[in-house]
Image (tube, rainbow, N blue to C red):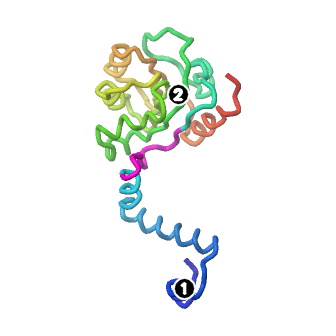
Amino acid sequence: MGVSASVISDYEKGRRTPGARFIKKYVDALLIIDGGREWAVVKELAKNFNLLYSTSILDVKELNSPIKLDTLLNLIDGFIVNSYVSSVDEIFGYTVIDSLEAIDGLSGNEFWQIMGMNTRRALIFTKVSTGRSPLIAVRVAPVKPATIILHGPKKIDPLAVKLADREGIPLVISLIEDVDTLISNLRSLNLTPS
């Protein structure tokens, strides 16, 4: 933390009152330690407050006003790959998920919590190879998103398309090259009129 042992001792014995800068350094140090222990404390705190903490969630946002699916498709350079044909659906939020981290780290009960505040949202799965796993997860989840976006697949598994059709959910492929650009474009939604 860059603080001498005598200063820490003074804080512990009440001879000094820590300022905001020290408290920030202290909290940052605790987070670094917890991160090295696979976020055990943060996960426990999240569980106690009925929140979901997962490194698989790259970004999540509730929108101030809904946007049309067509607007989202333009923003993410996306196209629908299944037989879904409506263009009047509204999206009220999005969640960007690292699909490999989600498979490894989320339980079934935690998966449905990624929906955020509402189900009229886009679930965006990154690091996808064929789309099968995300669609199976959505198929068995008790709540369904408004749309599913796959980022990074080289080909689409026919089962993924079939499951999206069965659920009546548009299945979208995003052609944006990297995840950071995808997230940056999505974050501009607060500035985009619907």
Residue linked to disc 2: 174
Is 123 on the left-hand or right-hand side of 178? left
Mark 1 residue element: loop
Above or below, 125 against 34 in this view is above
Is 132 on the left-hand or right-hand side of 4? left
On the rendered image, what quadrant is the N terminus found in? bottom right
Marks 2 and 1: in contact by CB < 8 Å? no
Residue type at mark 1: give it: Gly
On the rendered image, what quadrant is the C terminus found in? top right
Region of the chain picked out in magenta, as a range: 48-60
Chief secondary structure of the magenta portion:
loop
Residue 114: percent from the left, percent from the top? Answer: 42, 37
Q: How crowded is mark 1: few (under 14 residues within 10 Å), some or many (20 or more)?
A: few
Is 106 on the left-hand or right-hand side of 122? left
Gap in Å between the C-alphas at discs 1 and 2? 56 Å
> In the depicted view, which residue is nearer to us: 137 or 8?
8
Does the magenta-highlighted stretch encompass residue 41? no
Residue 57: percent from the left, percent from the top? Answer: 45, 43
Does the magenta-highlighted stretch encompass residue 55? yes
